[in-house]
């Protein structure tokens, strides 16, 4: 064991000396590995960033929430079947809450009615268009994970009496009230005046997903009075996060009972969950992964061929040295280890350079596009270094094996 450690240390020292003596050649040789490691690291960073971005965007609305609606959150072929479904009445929320009250140990925790539409909001000379306007109950903050930057959410009294009060998102507040607090001030929607009583904390959006930043909320009774008297909306149901399957089954049975569906009748409602959105993003992640793997594989293959070629050249240049070392008693294992470690060292240095470059590019993208959450994790660093080492072993083994098999007499006579 001591002899092996000595041979390993000696091989590392010789490899370092050779790399220092041929800096430019070593740098150009490692270029393919650098490109490959940058590609694989950025690919992993982007995929992890998509997951984090989706989680961050959806967490503001509660990541333990089921959505009872008319339409599924996926592409459908029998469009007319869903189009002709009865509307989801917001009054269902009260019936679900009655069930929850009588079954406190069940997986369902809270039901909140919601209705929404796009609207234009005006404040003096300032105007924002197509803002997601939400009508809901005073219980909504119990379900949402968003914090308040200023003010408060509307109370149960304000919700029941249909007061013209409004809670606005961070971006809406910034657009309508630049450099001033919106608290206590008024805006106009549909020609009606609303008092701003709260501003949600900045949440951030990702890939076009809704976020609190670009929406406003008002009491559902107020929403019905000004936007739509038709009882048509969505029910959001909070559940025990550890009992998703049980929650969906219980909610489905409860909705069938509320809708008075017979045993032979199909569901005329849809229970959606945030996992559906994540599944729809899988093709994006798979596309990034395939493109990244292709670029990574190509770059690493070219880099490995280059390193193999340079290692063969190095073996030829140092044939007499190999003969001398063998004549003095060096084993085949020692020669093999020497050239193999030299190839691995070049790849390892290329891997470090690639990781540094990928980290810099990730930081630059994060500064230019802060809404895209790039995640440069320690796992990616370890993966990049492991790939670098494996590339060095793959590319250096053949020439190192050839060097170890050289006959010392023939090697000493080599010119």
Image (cartoon, rainbow, N blue to C red):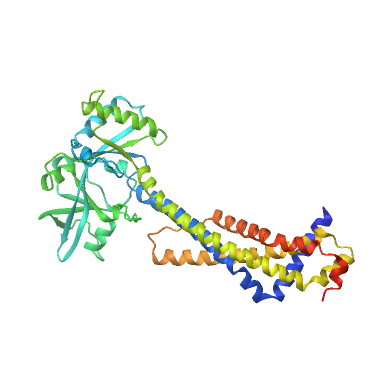
Q: Does residue 49 appear to the left or right of 61 in the view shown?
A: right
Depth check, front residue: 362 or 186? 362
Let me know if residue 388 appears in the view.
yes
Looking at this rendering, what residue extends furthest in the left direction?
Answer: 191
Depth check, front residue: 68 or 345? 345
How many circles with numbers are drawn on the protein? 0
Percent from the top left, x then y, of residue 238? Answer: 32, 37
Percent from the top left, x then y, of residue 247? Answer: 35, 32
Q: Is residue 46 above or below residue 107?
A: below
Percent from the top left, x then y, of residue 48? Answer: 46, 53
Q: Does residue 180 appear to the left or right of 330 in the view shown?
A: left
Percent from the top left, x then y, of residue 22? Answer: 69, 75
Q: Quadrant of the C terminus?
A: bottom right
Say which quarter of the image contains residue 414: bottom right
Say which quarter of the image contains residue 319: bottom right
> Which residue occupies 25% across, 47% down?
153
> Which residue occupies 32% across, 25% down?
103
Let me know if residue 6 appears in the view.
no
Q: Does residue 344 appear to the left or right of 65 in the view shown?
A: right
> Which residue occupies 72% across, 68% down?
312
> Which residue occupies 86% across, 73% down?
413
Looking at this rendering, what residue extends furthest in the top direction?
Answer: 263
């Amino acid at each position: 064991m001591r002899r092996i450690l000595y041979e390993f240390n000696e091989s590392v020292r010789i490899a370092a000396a050779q790399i220092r003596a041929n800096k430019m050649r070593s740098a150009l040789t490692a270029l393919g590995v650098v490109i490959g490691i940058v590609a694989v690291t950025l690919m992993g960073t982007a995929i992890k960033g998509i997951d984090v971005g989706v989680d961050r965007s959806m967490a503001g609305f509660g990541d333990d929430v089921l959505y009872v609606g008319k339409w599924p959150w996926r592409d459908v072929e029998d469009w007319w079947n869903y189009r002709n479904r009865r509307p989801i009445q917001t009054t269902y929320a009260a019936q679900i809450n009655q069930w929850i009250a009588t079954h406190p140990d069940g997986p369902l925790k809270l039901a909140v009615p919601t209705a929404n539409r796009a609207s234009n909001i005006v404040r003096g000379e300032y105007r924002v268009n197509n803002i997601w306007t939400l009508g809901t109950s005073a219980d909504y903050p119990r379900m949402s994970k968003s914090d308040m930057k200023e003010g408060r959410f509307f109370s149960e009294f304000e919700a029941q009496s249909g007061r013209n009060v409004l809670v606005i998102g961070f971006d809406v507040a910034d657009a309508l009230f630049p450099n001033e607090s919106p608290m206590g001030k008024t805006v106009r929607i549909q020609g009606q005046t609303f008092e701003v009583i709260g501003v949600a904390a900045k949440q951030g959006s990702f890939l076009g997903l809704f976020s609190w930043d670009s929406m406003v909320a008002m009491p559902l009774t107020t929403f019905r009075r000004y936007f739509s008297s038709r009882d048509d909306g969505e029910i959001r149901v909070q559940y025990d996060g550890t009992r998703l399957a049980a929650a969906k089954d219980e909610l489905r049975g409860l909705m069938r009972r509320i809708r008075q569906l017979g045993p032979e009748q199909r569901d005329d409602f849809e229970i959606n969950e945030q996992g559906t959105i994540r599944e729809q993003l899988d093709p994006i992640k798979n596309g990034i992964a395939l493109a990244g793997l292709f670029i990574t594989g190509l770059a690493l293959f070219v880099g490995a061929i280059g390193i193999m070629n340079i290692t063969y050249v190095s073996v030829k240049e140092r044939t007499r040295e190999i003969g001398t070392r063998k004549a003095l008693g060096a084993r085949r294992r020692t020669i093999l280890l020497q050239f193999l470690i030299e190839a691995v060292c070049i790849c390892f240095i290329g891997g470090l350079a690639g990781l540094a470059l990928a980290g810099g590019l990730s930081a630059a993208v994060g500064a230019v596009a802060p809404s895209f959450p790039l995640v440069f994790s320690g796992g990616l660093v370890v993966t990049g270094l492991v790939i670098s080492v494996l590339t060095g072993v793959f590319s250096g083994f053949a020439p190192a094996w050839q060097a170890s098999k050289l006959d010392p007499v023939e090697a000493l006579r080599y010119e």
